[in-house]
Image (cartoon, rainbow, N blue to C red):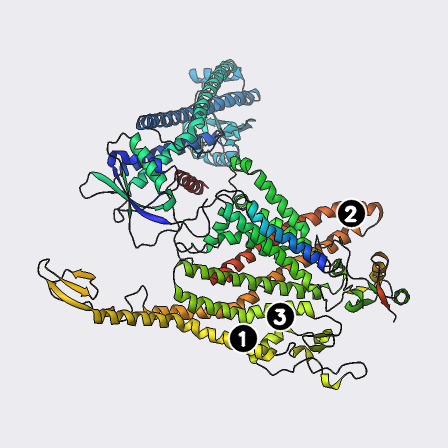
Amino acid sequence: MGSLTRSEEMRYCQMIVEKDAAFNIVAELGKKPYVQFKDLNPDVNSFQRMFVRDIRRYDELERKLRFLESQIVKDNIPIVGKIDDGDYKVLPNSELNQLEATLTDLERDVKNMNDSDAQLKANFMDLKEWDAVLDKTDEFFQGGVDDLAQEEFDVQEEGEIVAKVDKAPVNYLVGIIRREQLNGFERVLWRACHHTAYLRSADVAEPLEDANGEKVHKAAFIVFLKGDRMRTIVEKVCDGFKARLFKNCPKTFKERQSARNDVRARIQDLQTVIGQTREHRYRVLQAAANNHNQWLKQVRMQKTVYHHLNLFTFDGIGRFFVAECWIPLKHIDDVRRAIETGAERSGASVKPVLNILETSVEPPTYNETNKFTAVFQGIVDSYGIATYRELNPAPYTIISFPFLFSCMFGDLGHGVVMFMSGLWMVLREKALIARNIKDEIFGMFFGGRYIILLMGLFSIHAGIIYNDMFAKSFNIFGSSWKNPYSHDSIATWLNQSTHGKEMLLELPPEIAYQHSMGPYPFGVDPIWNIADNKLNFLNSMKMKLSVIIGITQMTFGVILSFFNHRFFKSNIDIYTVFIPQILFMACIFMYLCLQIILKWIFFWTVEDTIFGLTYPGSHCAPSLLIGLINMFMMKDRAVGFVDESAGKVNGMWKEVDTCYLSQWYPGQSIVEMVLVVVAVLCIPIMLAGKPLHHWLQERKKKKELHGNHTVRANVVADNSEIVLNGGAKKSENHESAAPASGGSGGGHHGEEALGDVIVHQAIHTIEYVLGCVSHTASYLRLWALSLAHAQLSEVLWHMVFVSGGLSMNGTVGFIATFVVFFFFFFLTVSILVLMEGLSAFLHALRLHWVEFQSKFYLGLGYAFVPFSFKEALSQAEASSQAASS
Amino acid sequence: MGILIPLVSVTAFWALIGFGGPLLVPKGPNRGIIQLMIIMTAVCCHLFWIMVFLHQLNPLIGPQINVKTIRWISEKWGDAPTLIDS
């Protein structure tokens, strides 16, 4: 991994290879992600490209593999292993042909097996239905006509005995129909046969499989009817209801029995055949499943190589293959070695050539990352890919992002939960990757495991400093606040108060706070956790914290822009952009930070002389916010807090009106006026400095061009020359002497026109000036979110755990605590860790993208997308999953 | 504990990490990044701590606590050297 400070240096190279060797060379290059090919045939249709046939061939193979996969999955055979196993060797052509033959055969075989399986099943179902019908027919006849009577019927038909009643012979039809349709069938039959047909039915107990494979309940029926005409009608009705008729139902019981035995034997046979067919199919599919991933990998790799070969073009003569590509400078030797290896493997006689070309196109941005830094680089790239070789914010983001997160999330308990989950994912990394879990949400968390680990770690530190663990504080070093009231007073007040509405007393800092002991050594004093007005204190602390952290980060961003200006050798930027920016920031915001720190150090509640001015007490402590506003308005303010000349009256100083707005160090109004003037002066410098410089540069160039060139006709070379004084020649292929119009009208000389520069600079200045103020306020979200988090945490503790569990006594309390803890912890993890964590993550992200990066980051580059098998395989996998889901 | 002891010890701790840590990083391709991480961690954490410390150095308001808790504080944490008689 190279240094992440700036993106890597890239070179534009030209590769000249023999056509036969091209395939092996590209296959060799795919093993490492070093080369990004440029499409040298942009206007060629994808159907007209050179290697279309090969790509089509592999598309076909992939289709066959997909078909096999669907069959394998249908039979619940697991496909083990991953497609991408890290081995990127490409198979030679002979083996590929074999693979093609194998796959074709497999596909054909599986299709045949499927067909025959369907056929066998249909036969099987027929037999089963016949069996069921035979069975039921027995039932019908047992309750009705028996064999002797049947024979009589037959005899009657044969003999021409005229029956007493002139009727047509009684006939019957057996069949099978779906159970749901039976009632409708009966009714229609009744009507159609003019109430002369008689239906008896019996349900078949076992559900039979339909043609589509669903199990349906069927019923066997027998219809008694008179005459042939009825028969036709009944047959038609059966057709309508899709009932199946069995024409050859044996009339006698014995015949039926033998038919049944026969059918049963045939069913057994068929079952065996079906079983064997299925087993054979299973074995074939399993063999295919074992090789499936390997084959798929090969096919996809081949396809990618051909896709990239399509980007090559022939050189002028037509013998050699040429490609143009971007390669990082430090990998050029690796690439050279790779193409030589590839050429050797294909036995080419000519060694391939790698030339470095000069180009004015902006190179792609490439940052080499490892699994740890990739996440942070990804965060930065989501906002915008860095411009080529500008300063990369990613290495600073590694620490500043979790730090800002922890300012908003600061709770020791939640931090531990987050840290543990990050740790688990990191320690079990390899096992989790091997499991290849496809779930998107898990994928997101797993991808960010290092961020989660760091965020948890910093949150633990922030939790210790905020002294907040599940809304409780620790008292490790001993609080610096002690009881200031005499025991008698306390006893009196206690007696006076009623239970539940005790008196609230403030502990005055002059007495209760042990100044000599100093503040709580590490973090917030635990007394604030039990104070009613703790929010007053904490809000003030967190707001000042947020502002100072914000201004620090923004100043850091401006300083980073200095390094960018220096790298791109743009001195004008340093003088007219960087220095005014820093001055503006320093005069207003760093001065504010300084004021905050001075107020912290010098102003307390006891009377003192500070900076030579008498300070009577805390109600005169200077208000910083209104002070800042007054600084801008250049308001007249009194010097000092008290009327010093009058002296002490009744032991008290006479205070000036609104003493918290007066000047608190000598010369403050002058200092502040200077600061404001300097800051305001910086604005026009930022607005006009660069455009002015640009305009002056152009005027200088115009003057040079006008004054310094003469035109000569060079008869020998048949063109004209423009000679600049000093001897540099510039020739043009014109017969006539056409002087280059100097400067060509204001501004096309440089990269930008003057108008563009003015607009650009105006936007930049306004963005910076307004941004300084608004972004400082924006950093107050550090305070807001941490307040919300702490309050939510407290609510959960008091309302859920204490009310629901800890406040109850005895056995009931024991059980209640046990049960309520589950809800407490569930809500803690889901709301406070997950939801608040996500929220703080988002806000920290915004702070980085907008407030920090707008100070120096351009983000106008495009990414380096090298050709690599790993990337191609993962992309193919993703797209196939998207297609299948 | 005094003001000096925590101030000096915590500052010294982070200074040790911030200045000494980078020297201990083994050579390798990631040296620069790890050094940067250590320095930034030391700076950020120290800044965080010292701001909270300074804010509590001279508190301008006191905690409002109910009388029962004050009695508990008196018994558990102790009394101030001079007490107020109402």
Q: Label for residue A675?
A: 1
Which residue does the numbered mark 2 point to in the structure image? A816
The chain containing the residue under callout 3 comes to: A
Does the rendering let one see residue A788? no
Mark sitting earlier along the chain (1/3)? 3
Q: What residue is pinned by disc 3?
A: A595
Q: Is circle 2 on the same chain as circle 3?
A: yes
Q: Residue at x 78, y 62 (%)?
A: A481
Label 2: which secondary element:
helix
Spot occupied by residue A58 in the image (x, y as percentages of width and height): 33, 34
For the point 45% across and 29% down, which residue is it? Answer: A72
Do labels 1 and 3 touch, CB within 8 Å? no
Image height check: is A325 above or below A253?
below
Q: Earlier in the sequence, mark 1 or mark 2?
A: 1
Mark 1 to mark 2 CA distance (whole Å): 63 Å
The residue lying furthest to the front in this view is A726
In the foreground, A75 or A463: A463
Q: Quadrant of residue A237?
A: top left
Image mark 2: chain: A
Q: Where is residue A204 in the image (x, y as percent from the top left)?
A: 54, 27
Residue A388 vs A342, above or below: the answer is: below
